[in-house]
Amino acid sequence: MFRFATRYGSNGLSLWLRQSNCRHGLNARTILHARRISGHSFGPPTDVEKIMLDSVKATGPISFSTFMQLSLGHPTHGYYMKPEHAVFGTQGDFITSPEISQMFGELVALWMIKQWMDTDVKMSFRVVELGPGRGTLMDDVLRVLKQLPAARGKLKSIHLVESSATMRALQEGKLRKASQEGNFQIMWHDGIEEIEPEEDVFTMLVAHEFFDALPVNVIERTQQGWNEVLIAPSSDPSIRYTIPSSDSDQNLDTPPTLHHTSSRWTRVLSPTPTASSTLLGLASPRFFSLPVGTRIEVSRASMNQARGIGKLINTKGGGSALVVDYGADRAFGDSLRAFKKHKIVDIFCSPGECDVTTNVDFALLKESMADLVSTHGPISQRNFLTCMGIEIRAAALVRSASSLERKKAIEDGANRLIDPCGMGEQYKVLGAVAKGRGEIWPFAVIQDSAQQSI
Ligand code: SAH
């Protein structure tokens, strides 16, 4: 067990941390644990499955990338697109850190503000979020910005990259008041590339649980090169592709996955390398020496988004970015999984009705932006939040809490976020800043500690 000291210096951030300003009268948040269930009971084909079946009839087995795009992002049938899907929280299918506790967004805000202060406190800034969900993280960030005297009047605009109209409506509702009071504009974008670079504005970017939702292709090393693992109807005798070498993960410490497939869909291996599998096999030098039989999930969309982050920061105004997600500094072979009502289900269970997600290969994100920015980490969420002062912040909130139930909820929230057996270690934090800034806090502190402990 180790502790890190917070190091905010005399810029007002340390003082803010100790204030007792709570997010609205917050009820205790239910702490939810994903559990596995068997995936054998499948109803009639969903709308997304009907599209998949038509697509297979027209052009053969489909890629995992197409499957994820359809399941999550189909304009009318995709999981994130449907107004009736609660998605987050107790009524939804999963819960995220900003939804667990206001402290998450507050500490992200302090990190962003510190990067701006360390660069040029006279410059105005803008905040960008990729995949803002219900807008809770941004709401917490804006509340902190409003309360810090140094930041007052400096916020130019908010940019939200969000593909779902349903989510955009939730975000608009949540952030309208802050935008009117703060007199800044909120702009929505379909992709990061739509955000104009601004020369004299510092860009602060955050992406929380965004990259895990981006499509991956699954490729397998064969004697011929990289072939692609595709999805086909299990009952179609006209499809004569081979079965991929193994359904087990070659990598360690991936979360539990179900290896059953529904009676309707199965994984098959393309008989020869595809254009995508060949290109993605070349995406990183780490993949060149992997042995025959190795299977990896590679996300071209993630590479593009990571490059987009690098381009936004690599301008005259500069900037900083935090990417928080589950994953590690390596590729995964079989981390694709689906969630329904806080349980892991078979990924082919009700496409379009379940959340589909993968672990993030942070090394690939870093490689994609390495020529544009300096990257730091990833470090565990536990280390990041502890360094940022979550214990001090929790104590301040507990002091001002009006009921025992509320005090307990604050403590439970903090413990859940830094739990070494759960979110604290599973979630990783990657920092990116303009080149030439040297080590940045708290990533440098954690590296130092690691060196000392050897
Ligand atoms: N950051 C939020 C929500 C995470 S869920 C939180 O942590 O609570 C993923 C979010 O990204 C949703 O808002 C979803 O609609 C959005 N999203 C998923 N794929 C996207 C894409 N390709 N482009 C833009 N937004 C996307």
Image (cartoon, helix red, strand yellow):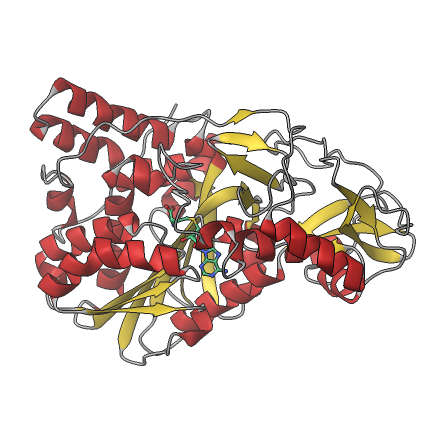
Is 288 on the left or on the right of 379, as rendered? right
Quadrant (top left/top right/bottom left/bottom right) for the N terminus: top left
Task: Return the x and y of residue 227 as percentages of the image width and height.
Answer: 83, 55
* Residue at x 41% of width, y 32% of height: 424
Would you identify the image quadrant in which residue 367 lies? bottom right
Residue at x 46%, y 36% (from the top left corner): 450
Q: Where residue 67 sits in the image (x, y, percent)?
A: 65, 53
Residue 418 showing in the rendered view: yes
Label tally? 0
Residue furthest top in the image: 404
On screen, residue 159 above or below 292: below
**Image location (x, y in percent) of residue 366:** 54, 58
Q: Is residue 190 left or right of residue 390?
A: right
Q: Is residue 20 left or right of residue 383?
A: left
Compared to 453, does 208 lie above or below? below
Residue at the (55%, 48%) spot, across then down: 352
Q: Who is closer to the viewer here, 324 or 402?
A: 402
| Vertical comparison of 90 with 147: above or below | above
Going 22% across and 48% down the picture, which residue do you hit? 140
Give the x, y percent position of residue 59: 79, 63
